[in-house]
């Protein structure tokens, strides 16, 4: 996608890299982002860095240059898109055990991940009869859109993926020669880690979409695309389509799940307060707090201001 100096540049990035002195890296990034008025979330762990940030084009370029100067990050994977306004209200730089949580401490994507497949080669791979296609994202993301014919594990979080695969392994792979397994996710990080997990489970022909869905939608023309629907993203755009154009999906601001037209018609849906998915998960006291937050955000909007609590923090996907 051409990025002709937009008002706001958004950078989704990740890199598996061997990091030490994580606190020093965290503090330096936090200071730089604060000085440049960059907003978003960056996660740092001993296995690398992951996150999405937004700011002026010059500010984003400076932050990306800093990250690329870190050990083994020169070829940092970045997807750029544009927006008219900042899609985040805060900047958070946090240290985590994993930059994407799978809960499998022996899995090391640096040592043994699957085969990268470029977006322009993806259609040929997933159209082969000996390839099974698995969506490694969460159920609420898949509901917004996916590749035609992809298997939906219906997982609530990425941490559920290993148990799902082990339970479904026999039905997925069958009794004959193992099929090729192709996997994908939003930006590439979850499917890269998932391929390392499958290789640890004894599979060799494991592939993942380089750059994830975002790079595919940016690279592959709509009339050649096998993507159906929109791609959920973890910011106020909610979802994007080809060329990373903002989509039409809406978001429940209580739980950050997408809401459908049927959800909007449900008596359990209240703007900023609840949707059919999260209503049974929350207490009356929590919904009252969400209602007050929504009221304050409307008042701030009427004053032409941004309410800092308008959006809860991103879910750990």
Image (tube, rainbow, N blue to C red):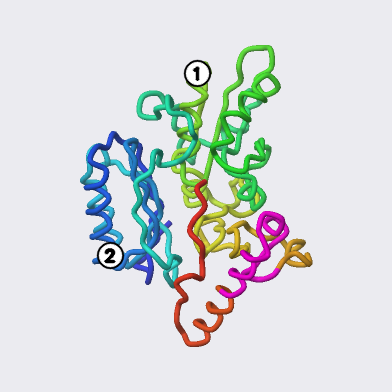
Quarter residue 83 falls in: bottom left
Q: Which residue is mark 1?
A: 204
Q: Residue at x 61, y 47 (%)?
A: 227
Please give the label number shown on residue 34: 2
Distance, label 2 to label 1, CA atoms, is: 44 Å
For the view shown, which residue lies furthest in the bottom direction?
A: 303
Q: Earlier in the sequence, mark 2 or mark 1?
A: 2
Rendered position, 124 above or below 267: above
Is 284 inside the magenta-drawn segment? yes
Report the span colored magenta: 270-292
Q: Residue at x 35, y 29 (%)?
A: 110
Q: Residue at x 48, y 52 (%)?
A: 218
Please give the label number shown on residue 52: none
Position of residue 121 measured from the top left corner of the image (x, y, whole percent): 50, 36
Asked whether residue 248 appears in the rendered view, the answer is no
Q: Are marks 2 and 1 in contact (CB under 8 Å)?
A: no
For the view shown, which residue lies furthest in the top direction?
A: 176
Position of residue 190 measured from the top left corner of the image (x, y, whole percent): 49, 39
- SS under mark 1: loop
2 vs 1, front mark: 2
Q: Which is more toward the observer, 74 or 265?
A: 265
Q: How many marks?
A: 2
């Amino acid at each position: 996608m051409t990025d002709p100096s937009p008002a706001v540049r958004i950078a989704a990035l990740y890199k598996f890299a061997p990091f030490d002195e994580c606190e020093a890296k965290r503090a330096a990034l936090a200071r730089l982002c604060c000085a440049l008025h960059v907003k978003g979330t960056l996660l740092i762990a001993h296995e690398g860095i992951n996150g999405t940030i937004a700011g002026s084009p010059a500010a984003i370029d400076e932050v990306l240059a800093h990250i690329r100067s870190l050990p083994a990050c020169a070829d940092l994977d970045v997807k750029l898109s544009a927006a008219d306004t900042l899609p985040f209200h805060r900047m958070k730089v946090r240290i985590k055990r994993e930059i994407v949580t799978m809960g499998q401490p022996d899995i090391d994507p640096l040592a043994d991940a699957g085969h990268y497949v470029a977006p322009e080669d993806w259609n040929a791979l997933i159209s082969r009869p000996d390839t099974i296609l698995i969506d490694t994202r969460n159920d609420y993301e898949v509901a917004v859109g996916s590749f035609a014919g992809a298997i939906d594990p219906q997982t609530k979080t990425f941490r559920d993926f290993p148990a799902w695969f082990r339970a479904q392994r026999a039905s997925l792979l069958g009794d004959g020669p193992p099929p090729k397994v192709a996997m994908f996710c939003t930006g590439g990080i979850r499917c890269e880690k998932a391929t390392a997990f499958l290789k640890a489970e004894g599979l060799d022909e494991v592939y993942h979409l380089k750059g994830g869905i975002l790079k595919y939608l940016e690279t592959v023309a709509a009339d050649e695309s096998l993507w159906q629907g929109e791609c959920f993203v973890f910011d106020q755009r909610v979802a994007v389509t080809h060329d990373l154009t903002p989509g039409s999906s809406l978001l429940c601001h209580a739980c950050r799940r997408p809401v459908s037209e049927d959800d909007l018609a449900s008596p359990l849906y209240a703007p900023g307060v609840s949707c059919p998915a999260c209503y049974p998960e929350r207490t009356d006291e929590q919904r009252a707090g969400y209602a007050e937050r929504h009221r304050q955000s409307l008042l701030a909007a009427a004053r032409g201001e941004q309410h800092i609590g308008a959006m809860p923090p991103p879910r750990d996907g």
